[in-house]
Image (cartoon, helix red, strand yellow):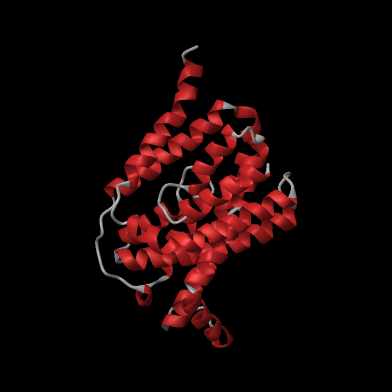
Amino acid sequence: MILEAIILGIMQGILEWLPISSQGQLSLVMYLFKVNKDQILAFSIFLHIGTMFAAIVYFRGDILNMLKGLPGYRFNYANQGNRLISFLLFATILTGAVGYPLYRLIRETAPSVGEAFIALIGGALIVTGLMQKYVKVRGERRTSDLNLKDTLLLGVVQGFSIIPGISRSGVTTSSLLFRKFGSEEALKLSFLMSIPAVLAAEIGLSLIEGLPPVGLEEILVGILFSFAFGLLSIHVLTKIARKIRFWAFCILIGTLALLPMLGYLLK
């Protein structure tokens, strides 16, 4: 499965920064590779380690500033340092509270539902596409304007992105735009949110469930390639994402993913 791990790592590194659900696309490809359904979700989540490190490198200045502010941190929104740390910390906690039960539900039901699992991915991709199509840039709020309402909304929304096909970057960016953040600030906050969320997910899943039932070598190869291609592509693809109608791609792929279920129902 080394070759498949390389392909999946490259895909994760490129697709993570686009609002088309890297996890949904990877799940469909892994399904085509005949990866066991009970391995698909866990392996796709571990591939995010690579792009998490790519985001850390890319946003190292913002992260270093936050780390410098940790000794004097207090949970409040009184100043910009505390505001961003509070936002990321409690949004991540909410993401876990919403996302882990969904993860367990999908993990336990996916092996037995067959075409319905692919249909779930297809429906989620269509929802992602429609959300991006109708979102509008409505304001120029910045990180210095973050508040508790933003934290609650974004934490819950990010939790639902555990569903394959729901784009984490797509729904969090769209939600920030709905909260009247500027487009540049929304993208930056969305990518910063991914770092503690992925870190918490990897630590939590490893402690609770151990490594996914695939070889450690395949996991490490996938992570390495997702990091390398994520670091190479993040700057270019974030600019492309603001100019291309990826919502149409989501809807198209989502519709195609629904066809097997349609054929099953028509039998």
The residue lying furthest to the top in this view is: 267
Residue 262 vertical position relative to residue 54 in the rendered view, above or below: above
Residue 39: quadrant of the picture: top right
The spot of residue 170 in percent (x, y) is 40, 52
Q: Position of residue 178 (x, y in %)?
A: 31, 58
Identify the residue at image location x=62%, y=52%.
222
Question: Residue 121 vs residue 205: left or right?
Answer: left
Q: Residue furthest front?
A: 3
Q: In which quarter of the view is residue 201 placed?
A: bottom right
Q: Can see residue 209?
A: no
Quadrant of the frame with the N terminus: top right
User: What x and y, as percent, mark residue 55?
Assistant: 50, 66
Residue at point 46% right, 47% down? 21
Nearest the camera: 222 or 61? 222
Q: Is residue 12 left or right of residue 138?
A: right
**In the displayed structure image, the side of residue 246 where residue 165 appears, left or right:** right
Q: Residue at horizontal 49%, vertical 23%?
A: 260
Q: Residue at x 33, y 49 (%)?
A: 132
Residue farthest bottom in this picture? 72
Seen in the picture, residue 61 relative to 108 is either above or below; the reply is below
Q: Is residue 114 visible?
A: yes
Number of callouts:
0
User: Where on the picture, by quarter, is residue 198?
Assistant: bottom right
Q: Nearer the viewer, residue 137 or 63?
A: 63
Q: Is residue 114 above or below residue 221?
A: above
